[in-house]
């Protein structure tokens, strides 16, 4: 059992208030390896950016909550030793049940997501409200989700089928009835590597800024969350394919679209896939270039600065640099 404050963490409330007021988003990065985690902390320190560490229930299966908490604490200690007052939150990404949220909070998470988006509206409200009541008693913040983002979130996840845009009138009712601190909405992003359907003239569709604007008018000051916001750089997809992989299709969200959304009510942007494919592409390349390697450090050590550069770039896109 841990309290998140013992781990050097904060909840997301004040982070979002500042981000909303100053029109940027707090970057939220999924991590699945120690070098990826170290690269996130390196980048946040270099850029003096707040950061939200995203750990999914699958990370718990891989490492266990205890290990996740310990690893995270090592990073926040490193910031403290550098005299860096950078706020760091540890957030359960896509918690699917009340019990998963409780387990995360008991193990030091400072923020949880309860994803009831596949449930009927009233059931989503009831589940989210239950998590909010439990979490707020412990000063932990809660993210809900309304509207469906298609695509698989992680290796092995099921693709959730067609996306459906979030209805702003339902957002207003959902937020008022549940008391959530922020809400993931579906406005044109999507999980996985194929996020957009290219228009017949070769251009890419735009995010639905009109929906974001409508939500902002109905709930002034309320932070929205963009999931599925990776750019999916073609050079990494090409590198994966060049070194033996087989990724046939990939279309990400153009960075200009994210830059525009963070100046509106979007205060948290989730990035997982860009980190996965960056690490994987470079791992494949490094292994091909070092056929005699007998130790995984041949790629883990080299991947850390490459990942750091990626996360620094993402911080710039979200406008969260030099905020602390
Ligand atoms: P990407 O797959 O676009 O990185 O989205 C990640 C995400 O939303 C995790 O919750």
Image (spheres, grey):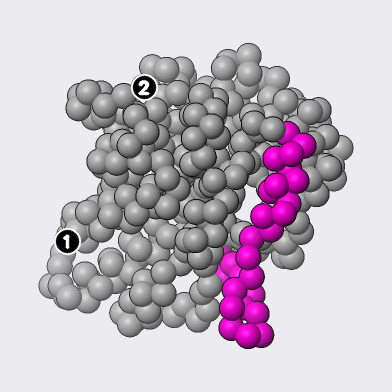
Secondary structure under tag 2 reads loop
- Quadrant in which the C terminus appears: top left
Res. 105 in view:
no
Residue interval drawn in magenta: 192-219
Residue marked by disc 2? 8
- Residue 248 lies, in percent from the top left, at 50, 81
Other residues around mark 2 within 10 Å, as few (<14) / some (14–19) / many (≥20)? many
**Residue at 57% in and 70% down:** 194
- Residue 67 lies, in percent from the top left, at 37, 34
210 vs 254, nearest the viewer: 210
Secondary structure under tag 1 reads helix
Q: Please tell me whether residue 117 is drawn above or below residue 151 in the rendered image.
A: above
Q: Tell which circle, 2 or 1, labels the residue nearer the N-terminal end.
A: 2
Residue marked by disc 1? 298
In 3D space, how far apart are the residues under numbered discs 2 and 1 (Cα atoms)?
Answer: 31 Å
Q: Check residue 200 for magenta coloring.
A: yes
């Amino acid at each position: 059992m841990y309290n998140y404050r013992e781990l050097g963490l904060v909840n997301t409330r004040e982070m979002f208030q500042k981000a909303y007021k100053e029109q940027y988003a707090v970057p939220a990065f999924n991590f699945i390896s120690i070098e990826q985690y170290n690269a996130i902390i390196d980048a946040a320190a270099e850029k003096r950016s707040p950061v939200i560490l995203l750990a999914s229930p699958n990370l718990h299966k891989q490492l266990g909550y205890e290990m996740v908490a310990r690893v995270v604490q090592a990073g926040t200690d490193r910031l403290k030793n550098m005299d860096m007052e950078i706020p760091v939150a540890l957030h359960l990404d896509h918690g699917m049940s009340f019990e998963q949220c409780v387990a995360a909070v008991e193990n030091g998470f400072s923020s949880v997501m309860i994803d009831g988006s596949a449930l009927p509206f009233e059931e989503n409200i009831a589940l989210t409200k239950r998590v909010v009541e439990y979490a707020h008693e412990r000063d932990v913040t809660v993210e809900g989700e309304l509207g469906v983002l298609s695509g698989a979130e992680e290796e092995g996840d099921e693709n959730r089928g067609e996306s459906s845009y979030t209805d702003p009138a339902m957002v207003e009712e959902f937020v008022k009835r549940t008391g959530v601190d922020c809400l993931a909405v579906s406005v044109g992003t999507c999980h996985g590597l194929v996020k957009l359907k290219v228009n017949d003239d070769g251009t890419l569709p735009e995010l639905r800024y009109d929906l974001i604007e409508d939500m902002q008018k109905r709930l002034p000051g309320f932070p929205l969350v963009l999931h599925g916001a990776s750019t999916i750089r073609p050079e990494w997809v090409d590198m994966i394919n060049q070194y033996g992989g087989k990724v046939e299709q990939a279309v990400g969200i153009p960075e200009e679209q994210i830059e525009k959304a963070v100046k509106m009510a979007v205060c948290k942007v989730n990035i997982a896939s860009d980190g996965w494919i960056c690490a994987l592409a470079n791992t494949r390349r490094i292994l091909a270039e070092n056929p005699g390697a007998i130790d995984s450090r041949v790629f883990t050590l080299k991947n850390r600065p490459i990942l750091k550069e990626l996360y620094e770039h993402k911080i710039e896109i979200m406008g969260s640099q030099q905020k602390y």
